[in-house]
Image (cartoon, rainbow, N blue to C red):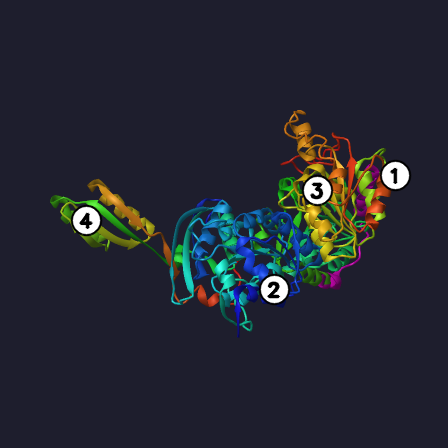
Amino acid sequence: MEVMTGAEALIKALKEQGVEIIFGIPGGAALDIYNALCDSSIRHILMRHEQCAAHAADGYARALGRVGVCMATSGPGATNLVTGIAAAYMDSSPLVALTAQVPTTYIGRDAFQEADITGITNPITKHNFQVRTPSEIPSVIKKAFFIAHSGRPGPVLVDFPKNVQASSAKVDFSNDIKLPGYRPNYEPHPLQVKKAVELLLQAERPMIVAGGGVIASNASAELISLAELLLAPVATTLMGKGCIPENHPLATGMIGMHGTVASNRLIQEADVILAVGVRFSDRTIGRIDEFGKDVKIIHIDIDSAEIGKNVDVNVPIVADAKRALNEIRKLLQENFKKKERSVWMAKLKELKEQLEEKANCTEGIKPPKLMVEIRKMLPENAIITTEVGQHQMWAALYLKIYKPRTFISSGGLGAMGFGFPAAIGAKVACPNVPVVDIAGDGSFIMNEQELATSVTEQIPVVVVILNNSMLGMVAQWQRLFYKRRYFAVNLGKVPDFVKLAEAYGAQGFRVQSIEEFSSAFKNALKSDVTTVIDVPIHPEENVFPMVPAGKALKEMMWE
Amino acid sequence: MENENQEQHYVIGAIVEHQPGVLFRVTSLIRRRGFNIQSISVGPTERREIARITLVVTGDKKIVEQVVKQLNKLVEVIKVSIINPERAVVRELALIKVNAPKSAKSEIINYAKIFKGHIVDASPKSLTVEVTGDSDKIDAFIKLLKPHGIKEVARTGITALSRGIESVNNKSEGGRTL
């Protein structure tokens, strides 16, 4: 037992959890915490907007597979975190958000900079806490980190009233935590594994759909080995991108609304679908009733509530993806006779080639070609983040990812402005790896102020803006489904992104051809300062293929 | 038992950590997921740190299973189960204030006796009756008093315990529902 202030107890508890980095912005109610932080070895990265503190911590968490930490003051600081927390929640990213709060004696009196942040974030956190005494801080922080990273990962918020930060108490760090209502299930049920294997043994046209859960569980090796044994094509969701190298012969790329032809067609013809760490979101699955009539679905997820939520399945397995895939493989191997599947494999090959052609038959700066060029110039372990919109889908379709945790995108929430701060977080996590934010002009503008963070904190990333002076994805929908009635999508040719970058002390380039792009990009990768490359593209470019919302995956549009 | 897609009432029992904010989390979740809640009751249990929440939800079986799974995800929720009313004691308490001029008093008192109710308050022109039972019994009692003119009704919502030795508590270690 030691006597210390709540703020000191917090910093000590964070150190115990191995926290090295906090992304945050201080404020009146947070001053005691910042005062204690000042003496610690934890690096604080001063962001320019709290939303970006959360996104950066999220990017850090996704790149490393460790809990990311962000911090904000009470009231507006805390509410600014909300979008970032929601993004982490939707994509199951382990995040601990620390917020300051007005003194307990003021809570409920609408004090200056008071916001009910535990109430506000209740539906977008895995759990949240408000500490009431310094002595409970060690156990609350232990619980927060444990909940954030275990089971299905997610954000946890801890709220610290100012008087709890400032007051002293005897604090005990040795206590074990008890969470009687929280018991994630990691081990697959043997009977369910057996049922899954029976289905897979009979399968003629097996198909794997892999999602973010495979990456969260570090189960790539298990996934690939099972796919190779089965000769099953592997489609990934946006969140699953990277769990199988996209140059692998069995990888068919993204599935869903903007999925590849191969993924979207093959899934219609599969007789057994093994879905791992996916939640069958509307953007992934289109209309389930259009799947093969007799298709059998095996669904592995660590969150039992995901099973049967959107799609009825034949064999549910509530477990950690890595362990479940391992068990399935072990049992399968005992009885499996290697099959040729020549027709199924020929189909896979033929469908895959369609997309490759699309990426190659282009002239001028076409987004697919640009994605291919970017990939060529990057090492395999480079990290790509994206904003949200057309550029995101071009990246998902055409920018091949080879390693897990190297593609970081706001999938579930679809938060524009995510990519740049997430890139900053990823770069802090992996300082020796190039980090590239594939952006659109609309998204980048939403958090361009973080250029200041990246320059002053010396966190160099590369931002490639596919600039169509439009809210491109909205414009695409207006073009395709609203009779070309463009409204509220024209952003004009402002700002000048080169000058904007320069105003912050970053580097800016504007390029008019693939050749110019290549030289600017090479320069950017060598630079020790953040670089923004403005790439004007045609304002009426569409992302294809596309399945209109609410339609079956087979109703793909090509132009 | 019943048609899976048919909408009906389900009684859900939840054992939760007895802490401020738990009820908020439960109701917030039910609202957010678009589930329909008929009644909810909360109270302490035999253990100080634990409370019991009893919910009545309307929906088909699939929806109710989803409610249970989502509730189970809440960190402070220790155990959730669907209570089969045929194998449980299901009770609700109602207080009914009814118009009771002198001429009607004895009839109302008689009705209360038949329903094993108690007169808990009386005034020259009214009686307040306390009655417990399942919701059907209370509905029937209220219907019976209606002609006299009901002034006010307060109902607690259902609370329930499974019959016999079976308890939600002793299954709570390590197990998962559904």
N-terminal of the pair, mark 1 or mark 2, is 2
Q: Are marks 4 and 1 on the same chain?
A: no
- In this orientation, which residue lies closer to the viewer: A249 or A146? A146
Three-letter amino acid code at the position of disc 3: Gln
Could you tell me how far apart the alpha carbons at marks 2 and 4 are, in whole angstroms?
Answer: 62 Å
Q: Which chain carries label 4?
A: B
Determine which residue is flagged by label 3.
Answer: A268
**Mark 4 or mark 1, whichever is nearer to me:** 1
Say if labels 3 and 2 share a chain: yes
- To which chain does the residue with label 1 belong? A
Residue that lies at the very extreme toward the left in this rendered image: B102
Residues packed near mark 1 inside 10 Å, few (<14), some (14 to 19) or many (20 plus) = few
Q: Does the magenta stretch include residue A187?
A: no
Give the Cα distance between marks 4 and 1: 91 Å
Q: Nearer the viewer, mark 3 or mark 1?
A: 1
Marks 3 and 1, how far apart at CA:
40 Å
Image: A106 above or below B46: above
Label 1: which secondary element: helix
Nearer-the-camera pick, A441 or A472? A441
Q: Give the range drawn in magenta.
A: A330-359
Residue picked out by circle 1 = A515
Q: Are marks 2 and 4 on the same chain?
A: no
**x and y, in percent, of residue B56 in the image:** 41, 51
